[in-house]
Image: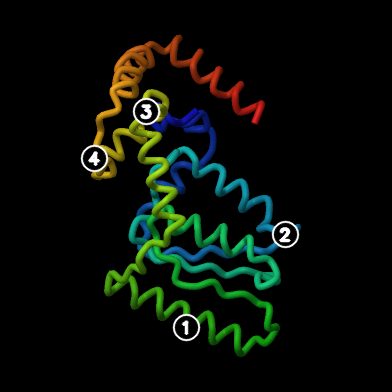
């Protein structure tokens, strides 16, 4: 469970977290390349997306310019496009475009990749960001409310980030949540209690 202080159980066990912190978070332009396998991107990409959760609900692509190169029939699987668009928008990045090899014409594909590269560079130099969509704004508000409220004592890393970045921009007079989090936050400082609470949360997810 990474929510208490963003210290993931995989920390130090492989190179992923260091890679993500030093390469992804510190880049201005990111290009993802993947292949459609069994109606989604490959299992390696699924694992990559899952492992990013050491950041829990904190956006890690803020103001970054993002491009995707996808091999496969993306036009026949709109679900993948929605996942990509929603993920990048929620992470507060800017999805410039998605280029595929569906046309099977090398000259056209080369032209599209060249155009993508030029736009990525221009948008980065000029700090251009397209306004967020309703799903991303709605999703961020849901996490904002829950992290301020009933999830605060568990996702204290999120709470600290949201507080420092002005995410809590709404009236905060829910006394029940205030009292609950005051009590539970103190209890979470005890490693034994924290472990017990996290195990209970894990049990709840098993039943979902």
Whether pointer 4 and pointer 3 mark residues with C-beta atoms closer than 8 Å, the reply is no
Q: On the rendered image, what quadrant is the C terminus found in?
A: top right
Which residue position is annotated with label 4? Answer: 164
Mark 3 nearby-residue class (10 Å; few <14, some 14–19, many ≥20): many
**Is tag 2's residue or tag 4's residue first in the polypeptide sequence?**
2
**Is tag 4's residue or tag 3's residue first in the polypeptide sequence?**
3
- Of helix, strand and loop, which one carries label 4? helix
Residue lying at 49% horizontally and 16% vertically, measured from the top left:
197
Work out how far the residue at label 4 is from the one at label 1, CA to CA, in angstroms. Answer: 37 Å
Residue lying at 46% horizontally and 48% vertically, measured from the top left:
19
Residue 180 in which image quadrant: top left
Residue lying at 43% horizontally and 30% vertically, measured from the top left:
3
Which residue position is annotated with label 3? Answer: 152
Which residue position is annotated with label 1? Answer: 115
- Of helix, strand and loop, which one carries label 1? helix
Work out how far the residue at label 3 is from the one at label 2, CA to CA, in angstroms. Answer: 36 Å
């Amino acid at each position: 469970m990474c929510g208490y202080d963003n210290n993931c159980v995989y920390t130090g066990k492989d190179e992923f977290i260091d890679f993500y912190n030093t390469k992804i978070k510190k880049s201005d332009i990111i290009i993802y390349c993947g292949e459609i396998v069994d109606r989604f991107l490959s299992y390696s990409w699924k694992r990559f997306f899952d492992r990013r959760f050491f950041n829990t609900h904190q956006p890690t692509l803020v103001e970054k310019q993002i491009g995707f190169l996808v091999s496969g029939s993306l036009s026949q699987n709109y679900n993948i496009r929605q996942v990509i668009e929603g993920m990048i928008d929620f992470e507060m990045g800017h999805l410039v475009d998605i280029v595929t090899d569906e046309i099977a014409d090398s000259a056209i594909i080369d032209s599209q990749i060249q155009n993508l590269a030029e736009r990525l560079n221009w948008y980065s130099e000029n700090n251009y960001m397209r306004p967020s969509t309703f799903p991303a704004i709605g999703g961020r508000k849901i996490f904002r409310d829950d992290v301020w409220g009933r999830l605060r004592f568990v996702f204290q890393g999120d709470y600290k980030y949201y507080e420092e970045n002005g995410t809590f921009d709404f009236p905060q007079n829910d006394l029940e949540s205030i009292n609950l989090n005051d009590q539970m936050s103190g209890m979470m400082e005890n490693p034994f209690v924290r472990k017990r609470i996290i195990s209970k949360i894990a049990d709840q997810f098993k039943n979902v």
